[in-house]
Amino acid sequence: DAGVIQSPRHEVTEMGQEVTLRCKPISGHNSLFWYRQTMMRGLELLIYFNNNVPIDDSGMPEDRFSAKMPNASFSTLKIQPSEPRDSAVYFCASSLSGTSFGYTFGSGTRLTVV
Amino acid sequence: QQQVKQSPQSLIVQKGGISIINCAYENTAFDYFPWYQQFPGKGPALLIAIRPDVSEKKEGRFTISFNKSAKQFSLHIMDSQPGDSATYFCAAGGSQGNLIFGKGTKLSVKP
């Protein structure tokens, strides 16, 4: 299994631009999680999906952030418009539905907004 | 109630020494307590995990000690090696399936 695949690995964009991060979960995993990692806040859960349905988006910082999961093998996290304070590493993780077990992270996308 | 508090923030240990990282949680509904290891440029990877029905779990040089009444758990790394230098995260999970993470501990093992 290739694991959780995220793209791009690095993204540098100008303030005000739209940014889209992508994630492919492990086949058979039907829970998907988006995390943001910064030195100050550590790993923050932004949103998670069960069977492609958003369950809890209370961690999404503001309306500029949106996430979709159109099918079991693909999810996107979009920031529009981006701001310098959005600079962070964004991780996607997947697991079997309704359980914390086998929680597997991707390698992350390092976002820099200048 | 959803917080997981982790300490210390950073730790320096000599090669061959014991590294100890502590975590505390508040929500008694949590029933799964994993530790993750993260190397620079990589995502966190599951290292070892414990359920609250046991007080200790050992895998090689890594041991989790769990104190249910105190709502605390800790990671012990015996015979620490320079290759163990990484950031370690404790986490707690429940029936909803999402994990709440501690802030992380950066471990440096000096040769």
Image: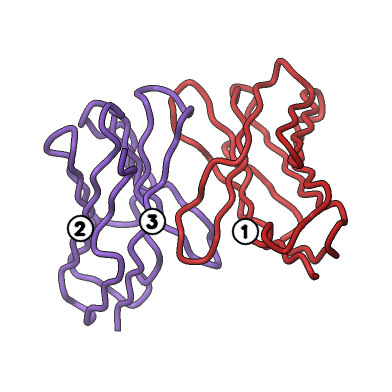
Chain colours: A purple, B red
Q: Label 3 is placed on what type of residue? A: Ser
Residue A65 lies in what quarter of the image? Answer: bottom left
Q: Which mark is residue B87?
A: 1
- Location of residue B16 with respect to A26 vertically, above or below: below
Q: CA distance from mark 1 to mark 2?
A: 28 Å
Q: Are marks 1 and 3 on the same chain?
A: no
Tag 3 residue: A107
Q: Residue at left 86%, top 57%?
A: B16
**Element marked by disc 3:** loop
Q: Is residue B66 left or right of residue A45?
A: right
Q: Which of marks 2 and 3 precedes in the sequence? A: 2
Q: Label 2 is placed on what type of residue? A: Lys
Q: Nearer the viewer, residue B106 or A16?
A: B106
Which quadrant is home to the N terminus of chain A?
Answer: top left
Q: Are marks 3 and 2 in contact (CB under 8 Å)?
A: no
Residue A40 is situated, as x and y percent measured from the top left of the image, at 55, 66
Q: Is residue B90 left or right of residue A95?
A: right
Count of number-bearing discs:
3
Q: Nearer the viewer, residue B101 or A16?
A: B101
Front label number (3 vs 2): 3
Residue A90 is situated, as x and y percent measured from the top left of the image, at 36, 59
Q: Which mark is residue A78?
A: 2
Q: Chain of mark 2?
A: A
Residue A52 is situated, as x and y percent measured from the top left of the image, at 20, 31
